[in-house]
Image: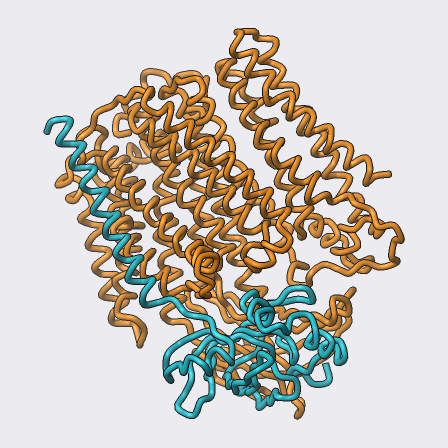
Amino acid sequence: MIAEAGHYALVLALGLALIQSFVPLLGARWGDPALMNVARSTALAQFLFVAASFAALVTLHVTSDFSVVNVFENSHSLKPLIYKFTGVWGNHEGSMLLWVLILALFGGLVAAFGNNLPLSLRAHVLAVQAWIAGAFYLFILITSNPFLRIPNPPIEGRDLNPVLQDIGLAVHPPMLYLGYVGFSISFSFAIAALMEGRIDAAWARWVRPWTLMAWIFLTLGIAMGSYWAYYELGWGGWWFWDPVENASLMPWLAGTALLHSALVMEKRNALKVWTILLSILTFSLSLLGTFLVRSGVLTSVHAFASDPTRGVFILLILCVFIGGSLSLFAGRASQLKQGGLFAPISREGALVLNNLFLTTACATVFIGTLYPLALEVLTGDKISVGAPFFNLTFGPLFVPLMIAVPFGPMLAWKRGDLYGAAQRLLAAGIAALIAMAVAWAWARGGSALAPLAIGLAIFVIAGAIADLVERIGLFRNPFAISFRRARGLPRSVWGSALAHAGVGLALIGIVCETTWNSEYIGTMKPNDLIPFAGYQLKLDNLSQRQGPNYREMVAAFSVSLDGEKLSVMTPSKRNFTTRGGASTTEAALLTRGVSQLYISLGDSTADGGVTVRIYHKPLVLLIWYGPVLMAFGGMLSLSDRRLRVGAPKPARGLRGLQAAE
Amino acid sequence: MTRKQRRLTMIGCALAVLAFAAGLVLYALRDSIVFFSTPSMAAEQHIAPGKRFRLGGLVQPGSLVCGGSQVSFEVADGSAKLPVTYKGILPDLFREGQGVVAEGALDGSGTFRADTVLAKHDENYMPKDVADALKKQGHWKDDYDKKVAQNVKGANCAHGG
């Protein structure tokens, strides 16, 4: 009954989406507010029905109703409750339902909080949202229905892939989808603007918070996914340049560019056409990501060709939306008036440079991800494009971008003073040189480029600090005045400084981890002692333990430093009784500052020992603290009242403090 | 600067960056991509020792020798076999009779020295290169599947687990 109700709710949502696709547009054409307002009700109702449908699937999973194919294939009655819940989106059908749930959520948010949008703009935006939603409801209902029943229900399910039975699954996909799908809003706004043939700075003011929100979630989602891979896969890698990862990196790069170009448009009313194009491209890359991950084309081009319904359907959605929006763009872009002149050396110029490098970097990732697919389809040759390709293309493009980052906020709008900015960045430059020298002196082995990269990262961080110091006049004014100025500084200034510093922080982590990571692989027996990276590790014992749906072998290591016992680390290896005896490695992590000691277990040997893999990863946590800081900066910016449309204008007296903006 | 000059400066910059990126991509595509090969393809092509490639196929049942962290096994594709050595921990999903992809190079004696071993499959997923290669040779879903079915849990290096 519940499955059928969920299915029916989804059909109703599709019906509502169809109404929402054209009624508001007719209303906008005829200037009829009542018809335009239909969009608001349908968007909210759509969200309710999709939420009901999603709730139905959650109920089926939690109650282990194995008469439903989706539950049978991905659940098991002994699975812990949390994984019964998260297992809902640990499979194709469920994750698509989560996708549309989040899409409907965003549509609902625009409907609920878009009261200050011009009526016809809101009608257009929601209609475009409904096109996307409708296409994906159809996709789910026709090719990926999660509510299908089995005629003869089995007693037990086949369980969820053990690798997915982890708290990471609870957080990573929803975050990532909030990011991916969140970009649909800026896409809808862009299409609405093109359809209306009207765009101004206010448009950017409406779009920017939505883009920023999506960007924050995507940043956190990618970072979370990377950390999950790091601790769950058992070999300490955190980024593999895997097509699935690239699929999320591409919208992130384009979205970051969009964030910056929307700023130019909002403040200076320039780069309109480019911003619209970026909005379209960003969401197109999100759709492409969905296609790559969900069509099975990555698993095998041939699997895709032999069971093409899903892949072809998403490919069709992809072509219609990307092709349609780009043609609309080509036809209408020339009507949008350009405004806001600026010199190449200016804040705008710096942001254009940022966009240039980010989109080019995005293009190289795009080529590296799709080239093997294209080559296989065209010639049948199989190649793998891995880390060396991306290090060689992505790296050199990021170096000039990182050098430019601290200059951007220092330059004035319209016409900047590069020499002045360089003077103000002198301290940051010196800090960078010192960092390079220190890294050089300390480094034992590793690439000669590493100290340079660390210097670059320090330059970015020190540049962000220098910008804040400059704005609040620290050291030039009495401390009390600086403090007052710091409190009066717009949150978006703090936000961008923190986000930029986050990039530098992540870079330090990446460089240190890849350059000075040490590794030990060997066999250990109980009471064996090995010295490793300054620590002493002793294997105390090996034991067996029974979990809810697995058995595990647990090893206990005592870790000591200079004769002092620090901690006991207990990595384990789990064997799941279901899924043909699949096993997973649960690594043990010991955090010291921002560095980590990492132990994962291999197989046990005939003579009672076990193979172990031990890593010391210096400063590895910075890789994820960086994105967290970026996201925090984004949130600060988002909470800036000046970003809120319709927020009362700040009093005149405060204006003076913002002159630097 | 006139408006036109400004525009030309920007377009010039953009083109310079794009040309730089295109150069990087072309260079990287020539030098840092890795081709995929099965044991029989490797035998036909006479790949030079030291040249990196990805070797894919099925782990020959009965060929796995575990010596602590040093393991050796054979990769087969139905018509040819290639011995592989690997120092390190095999992935969780590594089994005899199952698909595997190893990355590395041949040494002088014709043994494939792998530095990475991937066994990214569960019961209904096999590395795509392996599946395609097996299909091409007509071994897909026939004898190998049955063989795997016979000894449901192909041996891996685990003992008493």
Question: Between A185 and A143, which is closer to the camera in this rendering?
Answer: A143
Q: How many marks?
A: 0
The chosen color scheme is by chain
In this rendered view, identify the residue nearer to me: A552 or A336: A336
Residue A535, image x, y percentages: 47, 79
Asked if one can make out residue B161 in the rendered structure from this viewpoint, the answer is: yes
Q: Residue A509's spot in the image, x, y percent? A: 39, 60
A640 lies left or right of A156? left
Residue at left offset 53%, top offset 48%: A221
Look at 14% across and 28% down and name the residue there.
B4
> Which quadrant holds residue A13?
top right
Q: Is residue A77 above or below residue A658?
A: below
Q: Nearer the viewer, residue A493 or A248?
A: A248
Quarter residue B123 falls in: bottom right
- The x, y position of residue A578, in whole percent, is 77, 67
Query: Farthest residue toward the left?
Result: B1
* Image quarter (top left, top right, bottom left or bottom right) of the C terminus of chain A: top left
Quadrant in which the N terminus of chain A appears: top right
* Residue A175 place in picture, x, y as percent: 56, 45
Apparent colour of chain B: cyan
Asked whether residue A570 appears in the rendered view, the answer is no
Find chain A in the image and tell me its colour: orange
Q: Is B142 drawn above or below residue A528 in the view shown?
A: above
